[in-house]
Structures are given as structure tokens and as C-alpha cells.
Image (tube, helix red, strand yellow):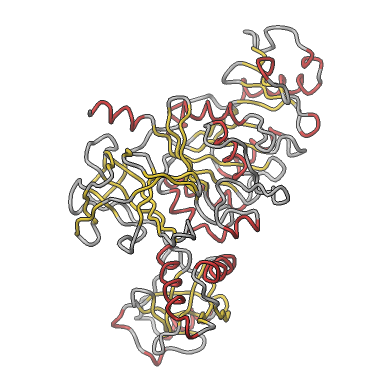
Amino acid sequence: MVQDLKKEVASRKTFAIISHPDAGKTTITEQLLLFGGAIRSAGTVKGKKSGKFATSDWMEIEKQRGISVTSSVMQFDYDGSRINILDTPGHSDFSEDTYRTLMAVDSAVMVIDSAKGIEAQTLKLFKVCRMRGIPIFTFINKMDRQGKAPLELLAELEEVLGIESYPMNWPIGMGKELGGLYDRYHRQVEQYRVDGDERFLPLGENGDLAEPHAIQNSSYYEQALDEIMLLDEAGNDFSEERIAAGELTPVFFGSALTNFGVETFLKTYVNFAPAPQPRQSNEGEVDPYMDKFSGFIFKIQANMNPAHRDRIAFVRICSGEFERGMSVNLTRTGKPIKLGNSTQFMADDRETVNSAVAGDIIGLYDTGNYQIGDTITNVSKTLQYEKLPQFTPELFMKVSAKNVMKQKHFHKGVEQLVQEGAIQLFKTWRMEDYIIGAVGQLQFEVFEHRMNNEYNSEIRMEPIGSKIARWIKEEDVDEKLSTQRSMLVKDRYDKPLFLFENEFALNWFHDKNPDIELTSLL
């Protein structure tokens, strides 16, 4: 039994796909699912006219806008491995959700638009991956369009991101002149728009094709050979150890939209991506291969199935084996809890899961027991995994129900969306009017859309603008310090804080009240 568990855990590959919006992240996710046999045809976020939407985009607003604003979880088997993909929100307004998702994976796939190179959101998310020391695999997308020169893209990777790279393949031309990929790792040329066995041409010992072929007459093929020679002589050496340490990123070129280079990437990724790694806790490092169960909740999502008004807590299993019906301890409350109703995902398709192991992501139907960051375990009653990041909001709105007769719907909606981490809730100090805070404007739009569609609650939103939120100690509360420029409010846990109008107001308050300690989240 123990050997079987070790084998199962070792077969898990759990990763997130990160990118700037519109780099092709959701499209590449679709293609990976296609190769894993999880879907029959790949939808694309651009496919609104055809009525085909991406499998990983399940929320109505995502289908309308062609963006991802939630983290989808998808699982499939491929080549002896069980793959868990977490498709993160691409929009920067939802970076907090993405940060938490990155805490639940063992590696990341970074998708880069070949025409745009490294963009702001990519850089931000990359830094989180580096901070955690997780391996990063790079897919440079849209090679079927004209873009930056491959050598320029590599230089940008190393200069902007500060990580060394090793190209696993190399493009032969690009855009309309794309002829194929020179696969350094598999020692073959993969031809573009050629199917069947003829697609792959083996390389000889000298690095050229083993057998003569028409592609050799192309000037782009000659250029690719010259650039490969340059990489062999002056480029970085391949190192599994440095990939595992997150110091070297293997780079793959291709086109997700035309499904070129994606399968080769997947095969190679499975070879080098790490199995579940040990996790830090308050009781030291937790070994994923131990037989006792533990995991943490990194996401809560309400109404994934609007017909059932359900609420799902997403759990990353960190050690041992989950069995449906097992009893575990919820560390935060110290109370035992039975895990009876569990599910696994294919975007909006779900099935009951009876067992799962370290590395897997499962969903637990939640009636209000769980919070983001909770540890559930039978290792010990005090085991707690590291805290998940929470950002200090920057934008604020007063919010109220338009229809006073629907206050119950309003309060339930606000409560559930706050528990998801979609927005943060504050209340005015005396009247306890609701103020919601968010990192980005789009979060408010999603909040309003979901309140209306999922909770049947029309809301009134009044912008109060950008504010600087700073918490204070309860003993320092003095209502006389509350002004229009420094509004005293309380958070959902009734902790006091000020919302400052701007940096000047913050500095003025600090100068006038040097003994009051002001703190922020992240």
C-alpha cells in the first residue's frame, strides 16, 4: 500500500499557467486538454461567433469578454502522469487570486506573446514564482504571426526576468514563413502544417537532417542552423538540477492557436516537471510521501453550478491520501470535520472523487466551514501551512441594495463573495454601511455582475475613489482622528483601519500622530 501511494504521488504534475492577458494562456490550456483526451475539440476565447467557448472559462462574464477572471482546475492523464492544470486569471485586477493559486502548484508554465515579449503581468507573476523557487517552463507563443526575433526574445528573458534560458527547440522562420521547429532536445525537425509520420524529420550526428529534404533549401532553415550553432557555442548548458531549482527555464516555441509545438512541449514538460514537493509548515517541512493526510484551502468559489447555488473550497493535497468520508482536523477551529462531499474538475464539469493523493487538487462542498488559507489534516491538531498572501485594496466603493426588500439576498451575496476573496469588505465606524475594496476596477464589475445574476440582488455602487488603507491597533482608536481625508472604518473582522485620501494625507496623519503604528497587508 505504501509503495502504491509513493508511485501515485510521484506521477503527479501540478502546475499553473501564467501570462499577460491575451498571450494565449487559455488557448494553450485547451490544447493540452485535447492531448490529454479530456476534450474532443479545443474552444478558444475568441470563438464567440461560433458559440464555442474555452473549456476553462466557465463564468458567464468570462464568456462575454473572452478573458479569464477565475482560476479553473483541470485534471487529465498523459503518458503515465496525472496532470493538474490551474489556469489562472490573466487579468491583472485578479492578481491576488493568481498569487494564491501559485502557492498550490509545484511548477509554472509561462506563456509569452512572441510579438510583445515580456509584459507587466508576466513580470509580476514571474517574481512570485522566483520568490517560491518553483521551476518555470516557458512557451513562446504565436510563432505563426510576425514577432520579435527569437534571439531578442531570449535576451529579454534573461535581462528583464533575470533567469537563464535553454531553448529546447528553435523556430525555422515565423509568421507566414514559419516552416517548422528545430527540436534540440528530441533531435528532430518538426514541420509546420504537416501531419502524420512525415511531420518529424530526424537529425544526423552533425546537427543537420539525417536524410535530404526540401526544407533544407529554405533560407530560414539555414538561418536556424546558424543560430543553433551560436546557441551551442555561446548559450547556456542544459541542467536538470538548475531547472528544478528555478534557475534555468527551458524555452519552447510554437503556436497554440494552430496547435503547433504544443504536444512536443507537453511530452518534454512531463519528463522534467517536478513531482509534489515538500511544503513548509509551523511544524517544519511536510513530506508529500508520508501516509498521513494534509492539505490547505487556497480558493473558495461560490455558484460554479448556478442551478445548485453551491460553494466549493479548493484544496491542494500536500501529503498522504484523501479518501471520501475521512475525518480530519480543521486547524483554525481545532474541530474535527468529515470530508463526505468531494469533487474533481474539468472546468465546469465535475465528478465525485473517492480518493486522491498529494499533488492533486480536489473540491469540497462547503456550507461555511472553510476560509482561504485553512489547513485540514490528520498529521497533528496544530499543523498549519504557511499563510496565503492578501493584498491591501487600493480602490473603494460604497455598496447597498437597491431593493430594501431583498436585503437577505444582498447580505448573503456580499458575505459569500467576500469569503471567496473576490473583494474585501469594510464598514463605516458608526453606521456600519458597507464599503468594498478591490485591487482593480474589473473586480467591481465582476462583483456587480455576480450579485445581480447569482444572488438576484441589484446593487447601488458609489465610488469613493482610490484610498490608502492602513490598519491600527484597537487601543489607538480615536473617532476624533476620522476626517474626510482619513476615514476610520473597520474590516470584516472588526479590526480598525484608516482609509487615507492620498500619500499627503497619510504622511500628515503620521507626522501629527507619530505614536500610532500604521500597517498594511501586502
Is 127 on the left or on the right of 22, as rendered?
Answer: left
Total count of labels: 0
**Considering only vertical position in the picture, is 485 above or below 386?**
below
**Considering only vertical position in the picture, is 291 above or below 476?**
above
Residue at point 40%, 59% (across, down): 311
- Residue 469 placed where, x, y %? 46, 74
Is 19 on the left or on the right of 278, as rendered?
Answer: right
Residue at point 51%, 33% (across, down): 248
> Where is residue 44, by image quadrant?
top right
- Residue 488 placed where, x, y %? 42, 84
Quadrant location, the C terminus: bottom left
Residue at point 60%, 20% (across, down): 184
**Considering only vertical position in the picture, is 399 above or below 16?**
below
- Residue 254 placed where, x, y %? 66, 32
- Residue 9 placed where, x, y %? 33, 33
Quadrant location, the N terminus: top left
> Where is residue 261, by image quadrant?
top right
Residue situated furthest bottom in the rendering: 480
Is 391 on the left or on the right of 227, as rendered?
Answer: left
**Considering only vertical position in the picture, is 11 above or below 513?**
above
